[in-house]
Amino acid sequence: MLLDYKPLDLAMVLIPVFVAIAAVEILGIYYFKFKTLNDTKEWFLNIFLGVASFPINGLFGFITIAALYWAKGYQINSFSFTLPTLIICFVLDDLRFYLHHRIVHRWRWGWGLHRVHHSSERFALDVGARQPWTKHFTGTMMLKVPLVLIGFDPIMVLFCGFINAYYQFMLHTQTIRKLPSWYEYIFNTPSHHRVHHGKNPKYLDSNYAGTLIIWDRMFGTFVKEDPEDLPDYGLVEPLNTYNPLRILFGEYWNIFKDVTKKNITIKQRFMYLFGPPGWSHDGTRKTSTDIKRDYLNIIKNS
């Protein structure tokens, strides 16, 4: 029952299932020669990062849980545990995820968390497990608080977020090309999520959806996968490392170095922390907006 929902208990049941599915995929890629990149060493690294993220993030989960139960004391309504309520909560929480996802791509402190997931130059189910360990320190988990304030129980909100995350795990594959058109229009799919992981200029900052791609269509961030220009995965500036500490915490170290530069203003230090990834006080780096603008200018003038 939902009332008895415990994230770690559910995770302990589902983790072996998804590890097994990821193992089947990598073996299928190897034996059936699918057109995708295999990397056994990275596969084990990604599984390690994902499995370890549960107890580590769970250790600090009290930060988010405390905020949600604090908010429960100020609810303007109280919705009962019914199927319609659960569906409405899921849809609203999916919108919450869209906002969170868009923020962590556009805000460097948030990117310090999310860069972990985007740092692989492959796209496979194990990449879905390549998760950060600092999600309760970014601040965007507080976007769940309004859902509790308007009347949803904290357990229901947490449950919807958990199911959304597992749906997204299954999107990280190249073995599924396209799903039925009606499904592709409403829901996030492997095709849509491949675009999100592409570092091609035309694909940057697009398809932030969790489960429902309708948010991207509504807010102008949807980009369709182009079979003539398939996604090139990874970061604009590749990490080229298997070191988990560099993968997990490297961007935080970069932020620290930028914020503590000599001879810059307080505003510039602020921008290194809260500005978009790629921002620099002297213009020597490029943000994703800069990269897309340059790309569009080339297309326009070609």
Image (cartoon, rainbow, N blue to C red):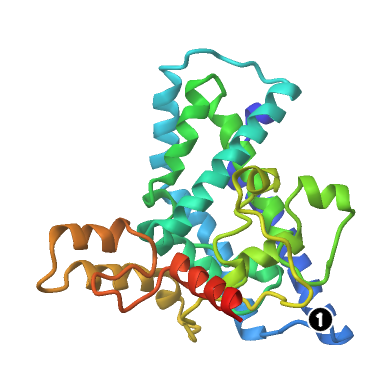
Q: Amino acid at mark 1?
A: Ile
Place of residue 215 in the rendered image (x, y in percent of width and height, measured from the top left): 64, 43
Place of residue 39 in the rendered image (x, y in percent of width and height, measured from the top left): 66, 85
Asked if one can make out residue 116 in the rendered structure from this viewpoint, the answer is yes
Q: Please tell me whether residue 58 is drawn above or below residue 174 in the rendered image.
A: above
Asked if one can make out residue 10 in the rendered structure from this viewpoint, the answer is no
Point 45% across, 81% down: residue: 243
Q: Please tell me whether residue 57 is drawn above or below residue 252 in the rendered image.
A: above
Point 46% across, 16% down: residue: 75
Q: As drawn, which residue projects farthest toward the top?
A: 77
- Of residues 101 and 206, the one nearer the viewer is 206
Place of residue 225 in the rendered image (x, y in percent of width and height, measured from the top left): 74, 66
Residue 24 sits in quarter: bottom right
Q: As drawn, which residue projects farthest toward the front?
A: 301
Q: As drawn, which residue projects farthest toward the left?
A: 263
Residue at label 1? Answer: 29
Place of residue 117 in the rendered image (x, y in percent of width and height, measured from the top left): 54, 66
Q: Secondary structure at mark 1?
A: helix
Classify residue 282 as left or right of residue 59.
left
Q: Please tell me whether residue 208 is drawn above or below residue 91 in the rendered image.
A: below
- Of residues 75 and 3, the one nearer the viewer is 75
